[in-house]
Image (cartoon, grey):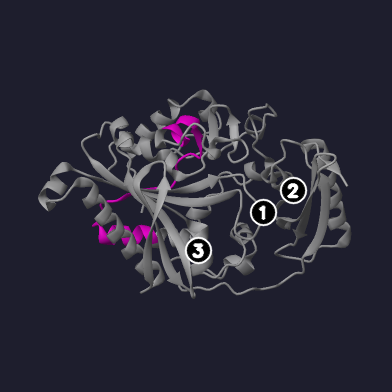
Amino acid sequence: AVDVDEGRTMAMAMAALRRPACARRWCKVRAASCTRFSKEELITGRPDNNVTEHVVERLGAQLHLQENHPLSILRSAIEEWFAKEHEGKFRCFNDLPPLVTTKANFDDVLVPADHVSRSMNDTYYVDANTVLRCHTSAHQAEMLRKGETRFLVTGDVYRRDTVDSTHYPVFHQMEGVRVFEPEEWEVAGVDGTKLAEKELKSTLEGLARHLFGDVEMRWIDEYFPFTDPSFELEIFFNDEWMEVLGCGVMEQAILEEAGLGNKKAWAFGLGLERLAMVLFEIPDIRLFWSTDQRFLSQFKAGDMSAKFKAYSKFPPCFKDVSFWIPENFTENNLCEVTRGIAGDLVEEVKLIDEFHNPKKGRTSHCYRIAYRSMERSLTDEEVNQLQESVRSSLVDQLGVELR
C-alpha cells in the first residue's frame, strides 16, 4: 500500500542526509528507514542522554509491517479504507526514521517550550537536539514541505511511562493529514475551517464504523497544541465509552511555515495498540512483542475478526519496595529502572502507600511490583534476584534511601 517510487526514495534519502549528523549516524538510508543502530552511540551516558537498552533492543522491529501481526492487520485495514473512500488519493508512509530532531518533534508542531512532554522524564533523548519521536506528528511538517497533501504516516513511537497492562515505552501511532485548496471551500460556500472540520468528522466517523461496526459516537472538545478546534472521538463499545483518536483542524501557523498559508487542513492521530487490544481482545500490551507462536499464529493478514485466546495464565509474583524519596524523584524514573532490569517480566509497578513525616520533612513511598512471564512460571529464586537488583539500582541510580 506504500506508494514510494524510486525518485521519491532518492529524494527522501537526500533529506535524511541533510539531517544533523547526530540524527543520521544511526540510520542506514534505504527508503528512508533506520535499519541499523549503534548501541554505543544511542546510549552515551551523557547528562543529555536517557535512552535505555530495553528501548534500543526494540528499535527497528517494525511490528506494524509484519504481515500477520495484529498491528499490521489493523494498519492495513485503515489504509485500505482510506484508499477505497478517497479513491487512492492518500499516500502511505510506514518506514520513516524514528530518530528525529527536537525541532521536528516539538517546535514544528507548536509544542510549547514549557510543555511536560519536552522533559527527560517523558521523552527519550539521544542528545539535546535528537530524540526518539514521541508521536508520528514529528513528520507532519516535513511531509507538508515536500508537497504531500493527503497522507498517512504509521510508525513506532517512544515515551517514558508507567508500567501496567496498557502502557509500554514503545508503541505505534498512525497520523493522517488532508490539505484543502481555497477553491474547495469556495465551491462549498463555507468557511475553510468549517469545511475541514465537517469532512474530518465525516471521515473519522466512517473509519470508526469500518472498524467497530454501527456504534454510537460522540465528539469531545479537546486541546492539542497543533490543532484548533481540536476533538476526541469516542464510541460506545462493550458497554462503555472509549476514546478512539484525537484530531482537529491544523493550526494555520504550521501550514504557513510549510508555505501553505492560503490553505486549510485537518489532522488526526490514533494509537494502534489501544484499538488492537479492544478489537482483538488482547489483554496485555506486552503480548504485541511476543515471539511465541501460540500468540502469533492466532492472527492472519486481512482477518479483523480474530479474538485472542489465552494459551496459558501463569501466576504473578508480588514484591514490595519502600523508600524515602529524594527531591528529584519521579515515578517514570522508577519504572525505567525496573524495566531496565526485569524487561517484559515486570507486569505492573503500583504505588500502594505514601507517608509524609512532618518532623523530618521527608516522604516515603511503597511500590508493589508484579512480576509475571507471559510464557512460563517464574521461580522464587529468579524473582528474588530481580527484586534485589531493582532495590540496589534504585539506590545507585535514583538516590533513594531504602526502608
Q: Amino acid at mark 2?
A: Thr
Cα–Cα gap, marks 3 and 2 = 26 Å
Q: Is residue 87 left or right of residue 362?
A: left
Tell me if label 2 and label 1 are in contact, CB under 8 Å. yes
**Residue 322 horizontal/vertical position (percent):** 83, 50
Q: Which residue is mark 3?
A: 276
Is residue 295 something one can see in this rendering?
A: yes
Cα–Cα gap, marks 1 and 3 = 19 Å
Q: Residue at x 11, y 51 (%)?
A: 189
Q: Amino acid at mark 1?
A: Val
Q: Earlier in the sequence, mark 3 or mark 2?
A: 3
Q: Earlier in the sequence, mark 2 or mark 1?
A: 1
Q: Secondary structure at mark 3?
A: helix
Magenta residues span: 78-107
| Crowd band around label 2 with a 10 angstrom C-alpha radius: few (<14), some (14–19), many (20+) | many
- Quadrant hosting residue 51: top right
Q: Which residue is mark 1?
A: 163
Foreground label between 1 and 3: 1
Is residue 345 positioned above or below 208 on the image?
above
Q: Is residue 285 left or right of residue 237?
A: right
Q: Secondary structure at mark 2?
A: helix
**Residue 21 horizontal/vertical position (percent):** 52, 24
Is residue 278 positioned above or below 164 on the image?
below
Q: Secondary structure at mark 1?
A: loop
